[in-house]
Every structure is written in structure tokens, then in C-alpha cells.
Image (cartoon, rainbow, N blue to C red):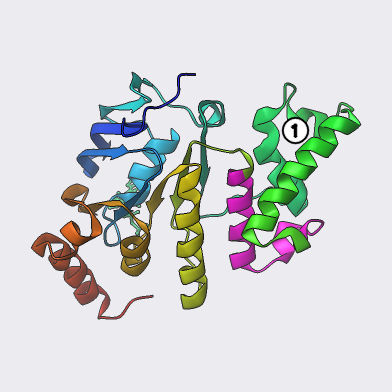
């Protein structure tokens, strides 16, 4: 795979539209993720953030538009192709394997570097001690980074939600992605945990690009190099945090949401 020149786009979404029946959830949205940058997607509830994220993961096929990876059209993006391309993701729903321990879950992320399938060998075929050791070491390193190494042998369901989110992040990092897609990483976290998350995501840019979808304005503003603001499926602003912060359409979108919810943030 050719290396990406500094400054050349890593992942591009061009003119993507997603329709669900008569509803246009994402309307002609374009976004470019550059190497070593965090690109944020924000917007009030129902703005189309998760739908756009699902397009990036191959869960949702756009009605029109184009996706490209390192300058090449990726055509129909499929979730199972992401890891091989160098893309990892965490989902809002956490999505850990309930029957596997924490370390086994994270080893699934590191599986990208194995020849034979990790899951098939886990459930059926014997695998070499060296393979097992290497995967476990990679998993433990990722878990140490996100602060969950102490939970290695626990089942995810027995852990608090914020810890499960850290496990999911460790699993994505164990894949050593070139692009990390994070859907609502701050949901369910307290104020201090969100600050910690923001600092951690910032450190990731030495080794991966990040697309971060979240509605926590403070997190996105403090962590992202570039931001795309959606409202009713459309891009209402795009640029640096400074550029989007004072855009009237952004203020309108958030004030509008506050009014709809009766004020306050969650
Ligand atoms: N599978 C689907 N079928 C029909 N409509 C959908 C589907 N998924 C999303 N929508 C609709 O598309 C619009 C955008 O939803 P989406 O979940 O992408 O917004 P969001 O910005 O992620 O919102 P939230 O912050 O509440 O998660 C909403 O009106 C939603 O009801």
C-alpha cells in the first residue's frame, strides 16, 4: 500500500446523500480526513451524524456520492473490509463480544496482523503459542494505554459502561489503524472522563487520523483540527474550531436544539 504524502487526503467523502424512504438523513455532505488530524462531525440530535458515520463504516450505503481512500475510489465500502484497509472504529453501542473476556475482545482487534482467522481459531482450531502470545501482548499494550489492563480477564457485561467504552477503544487501537472512526465516544461519560478522553484522542494523531462524531461541543472544539457541522442532514459550517464557532448557522442549530429540549446539555 503506498504511503500517504503529508497533506494529501487519507479519506474523502464527496457529495454523499443518504435517503431513508422519503427522509433525507444526509444531504450532499463532503468531508476530507487528512493524516495526523482529528476531524470532528457535530450537530444536534437527528442532524445525520450517525448516518454519516455509518456510511464511513460501510453499514449504510449512500444513495449517491463517492468515498475514496488514499486517493482511490473505494466503491462499495463494506464493514469487513475496513480492518484490511487500515480503518478501525468504535460504535456508540460499544458492541463488545459478551462471551469473550476483555483481553480476548481486544485480541480480535489485533487479529488484522494474523494470517489465519482469530475467531475460527479461538472457537475451534488450535493456534500456536507464539501467535497467542503476540496477540495477547498487542492487546495488553492497547489496554494499558486506555487504562483497562486490570480488567483483562473480566467479561465486558460485568464492567461499568465507561470502562466498556475504553475496552472498545483499546480493541480499535490494537488494529493499529491509519484512520480511527469514533462514534459518540463521550456518550455516557462524566465531565472529567470527557476531558481525559479529549486529551487521549489528541495524543493519537502521532499515529492515526481520527474522525470523531459527537454532539459534545466542548470536546469537539478542544480536540479537533477541522470540524463539519451538520443540521437536518446538511453541512451548515466546516473549518477550524475558530471558523465554525461563531458561525450563525451553528449557533442557530444548537440554540434550536436547546429550545427543542427545554435548555441544558446532557
Ligand atoms: N435506519 C433509518 N431509517 C429511517 N430513518 C432513519 C434511520 N436512521 C436514521 N434515520 C433518521 O435520519 C435522521 C438522522 O439520524 P441520525 O441518527 O443520523 O442523526 P444523529 O445526528 O446521529 O442524531 P443523534 O445525535 O440523536 O444520534 C433522523 O431523522 C433519523 O430519525
Rendered location of residue 25, percent (x, y): 26, 45
Is residue 168 part of the magenta span, yes or no? yes
The magenta stretch spans which residues?
Answer: 151-173
Q: Quadrant of residue 35?
A: top left
- The residue located at (69%, 39%) in the rendering is 108
- The residue located at (26%, 58%) in the rendering is 43
Work out whether 182 lies above or below 17: below
Work out whether 252 lies above or below 176: below
Quarter of the picture holding the C terminus: bottom left
Q: Quadrant of residue 63?
A: top left
Q: Is residue 119 left or right of residue 73?
A: right
Residue on which disc 1 sits: 119
Res 59 visible: no
Camera-nearest residue between 209 and 132? 209
The 10 Å Cα crowd at callout 1, few under 14, some 14 to 19, many 20 or more, is: few
Work out whether 101 lies above or below 245: above
Q: Is residue 154 left or right of residue 61?
A: right
Camera-nearest residue between 212 and 259? 212
| Residue that lies at the very extreme toward the left in this rendered image | 248
Camera-nearest residue between 102 and 240? 240
Rendered location of residue 181, percent (x, y): 45, 45
Rendered location of residue 264, percent (x, y): 30, 80
Amino acid at each position: 500500500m503506498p504511503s500517504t504524502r503529508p497533506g494529501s487526503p487519507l479519506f474523502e467523502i464527496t457529495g454523499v446523500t443518504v435517503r431513508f424512504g422519503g427522509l433525507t438523513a444526509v444531504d450532499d455532505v463532503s468531508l476530507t480526513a487528512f493524516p495526523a488530524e482529528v476531524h470532528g462531525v457535530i450537530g444536534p440530535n437527528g442532524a445525520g451524524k450517525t448516518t454519516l458515520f455509518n456510511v464511513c463504516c460501510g453499514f449504510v450505503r449512500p444513495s449517491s456520492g463517492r468515498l475514496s481512500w488514499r486517493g482511490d475510489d473505494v466503491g462499495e465500502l463494506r464493514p469487513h473490509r475496513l480492518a484490511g484497509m487500515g480503518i478501525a472504529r468504535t460504535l456508540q453501542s460499544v458492541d463488545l463480544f459478551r462471551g469473550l473476556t476483555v483481553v480476548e475482545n481486544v485480541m480480535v482487534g489485533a487479529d488484522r496482523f494474523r494470517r489465519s482467522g482469530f475467531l475460527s481459531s479461538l472457537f475451534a482450531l488450535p493456534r500456536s503459542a507464539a501467535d497467542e502470545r503476540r496477540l495477547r501482548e498487542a492487546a495488553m499494550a492497547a489496554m494499558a494505554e486506555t487504562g483497562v489492563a486490570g480488567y483483562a480477564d473480566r467479561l465486558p457485561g460485568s464492567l461499568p459502561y465507561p470502562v466498556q467504552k475504553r475496552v472498545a477503544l483499546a480493541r480499535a487501537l490494537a488494529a493499529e489503524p491509519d484512520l480511527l472512526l469514533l462514534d459518540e465516544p463521550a456518550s455516557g461519560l462524566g465531565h472529567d472522563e470527557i476531558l481525559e478522553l479529549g486529551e487521549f484522542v489528541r495524543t493519537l494523531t502521532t499515529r492515526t487520523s481520527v474522525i470523531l462524531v459527537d454532539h459534545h461541543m466542548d470536546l469537539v472544539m478542544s480536540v479537533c483540527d477541522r470540524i463539519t457541522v451538520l443540521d437536518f442532514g446538511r453541512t451548515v459550517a466546516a473549518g477550524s474550531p475558530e471558523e465554525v464557532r461563531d458561525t450563525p448557522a451553528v449557533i442557530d442549530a444548537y440554540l434550536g436544539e436547546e429550545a427543542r429540549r427545554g435548555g441544558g446539555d446532557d
